[in-house]
Each structure stands twice: as structure tokens, then as C-alpha cells.
Image (spheres, rainbow, N blue to C red):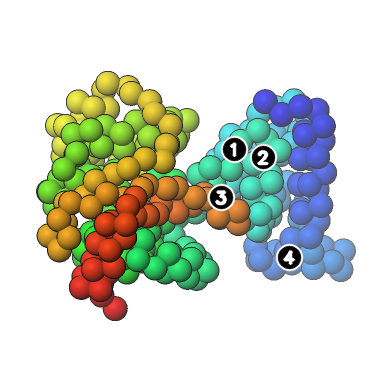
Amino acid sequence: MPNQAARAELGGFLRMRRESVARSRHGLPPIRGRDNGLRREEVAFLSSISVTWYTWLEQGRDINPSRQVLDAIGETLALSPADQTYLLSLAGFSPGGTAPPGEPPDHVHRLLEAFGRSPAFALDPDWEITAWNRAYAALYPRVRTVSDDDRNLLSLVFTDPSIKLLMPDWEVESRRFVSEFRMQNGARLDEAAVVRLLDRLRAKSPEFDRIWDDHTIEGFQTRIRRFDHALTGEIELEYHRLTPADQPDLNIVVYTPATDTAAAQLDRLVGEGSVT
């Protein structure tokens, strides 16, 4: 729950942004010769909230707006991603899960390719795989052909038979995936995207249904993960997860060679299995 200082800052922030919004963005005529600036009642109407509620926000009252309300206000005020993250933080929300899903910026793609022979991919808060490098496509070729709707890491672990063949420790690792997902997204279990994913997995995978009901929790830890690939045989890779400072809702997952043998295997894998 935000303190008084945070509430006051939130109110001042909203007032400043409200006064700078172009009225034409919302199809509104100039007011008193000014093209910028919205009335409180206009913000409230465009955000589908009451004028009283919005006024209390600007006054720094001790109220607790939902993330959905703040997202709606942010859209009305044309907040930048950084502004929206700041607004949410002032209201007591963590930045995780605030960015809209979609294609990562070009610099994320360049970062993934910079890992070279190390397979790497990007995950959004719902664990959708939004980008990957050539090394990851060589390790897991199906990532290129699976439909956008199905390219979810948690879903693929339980619904793609090729992953069971690729991961000899699937029984152990699948439980870790579920535990890590629950740890990361436990506060979002009522959000529509998460509900859809879990409902789909429960319907498609009895194994997932059983593991999910165990309610196991495990935070992410760098560890060794084994793969059994047709080109290399068994290969040991170390599993890392990074978060770009300017993309706080994005996780970069990187598999680096755990041994000199694994490094040579990755060289062979990328050389023989990569695609353009």
C-alpha cells in the first residue's frame, strides 16, 4: 500500500500529464484556446471511471486503484512505457507484467544473436516466447514452426512430444517449470491471459493438471540442464535468466556450455542445424 508521499507524488504526476495531453488525440476541440490539457471529468469519462474516484487520485487520497484502472488512465493520458511503470510503482504495483505483449524491440533481437553459439530466447510475463536466436532454433527447431498462439514455454513443455525427447530429465524439469511459473506469476492468477493458459493446459495435459495441484513453489536458480539432441547426443548446458534494464517485463533465457565438450557440441549444433 503506497504511503502519503507516494500518493501525493502520484496525484501531482497525474495532474502534470493530464495538462499536457493533446485534446485532438481524443477528438476533443480546443478549450479556452488551448490544444493541450484534459478536464478531470474528461479523463474519468475516457477511462471509464467516476469523476470522484479520479479526483481523489489527483488529491492523493488514501484509496487503492486497481492495475486495470491505472492502465486505463495511462492509455487516456498517453503515458509512455516508462511513465506507466512509474505510475504503477507509485500505486504500489511491481513492474512485472505491465508491458503489453508483442514483438520485442530490435536491440533485444541483436542481443540474442550476440550470444552466438549459446541458445537464447526472450520470454514475456506470460512465458510467451517472443524472440530467439539461431542457436536456439538449432537446439529446438519447432520454435520456428509452432503457431504464435502455442509458442508459450510452459505450454510447449507439456504439449510438444519433441520436448520430452529433447529433455531426458523431463519428469524433474517439468515440475521445475511449473514451480517457477507459479512463483513468478502467483499474483496474476486471476488475470485473463494466465487463466486462459492454465485452463488450456489443464484440459490438454493430465501431467500438468497433477503437478499444478501440488502447489509447489521454486524461485529461479541457475543450474545445469541436460538435452539429448539428434546431432550432438547428450549435451549439458547451464541455464541463465537475465532482465534488460529498459525491458523489465522481459526475461532473456540463455543456455551456455557447462563444459568444453558442451562448447564443441554447440559449435557443431549451430554449424549444422542453424537456419537463416
Q: Which residue is mark 3?
A: 248
Badge 4 or badge 2: first in the primary sequence = 4
Mark 3 packing: few (<14 Cα in 10 Å), some, or many (20+)?
some
Task: Name the secondary structure under disc 2.
Answer: helix
Mark sitting on residue 32: none
Q: How many marks?
A: 4
- Looking at the image, which is closer to me, 41 or 119? 119
Q: Which residue is mark 4?
A: 22
Query: Residue 138's spot in the image, x, y percent?
Result: 24, 65
Regarding residue 161, the answer to whether it shows in the image is yes
Q: Which residue is mark 2?
A: 89
Badge 1 or badge 2: first in the primary sequence = 2
Query: Residue 49's spot in the image, x, y percent?
Result: 62, 40
Q: What amino acid is at disc 2?
A: Ser
Residue at (81, 52) in percent of width and height: 16
- Looking at the image, which is closer to me, 67 or 231? 231
Would you say 242 lies left or right of 246 here?
left
Q: Which residue is mark 1?
A: 94
Residue at (54, 46) in percent of width and height: 98
Badge 1 or badge 4: first in the primary sequence = 4
Task: Name the secondary structure under disc 3.
Answer: loop
Task: Evaluate if marks 1 and 2 touch, with contact meaning CB atoms under 8 Å apart.
Answer: yes
Would you say 155 lies left or right of 220 here?
left
Badge 4 or badge 3: first in the primary sequence = 4
Task: Name the secondary structure under disc 1.
Answer: loop
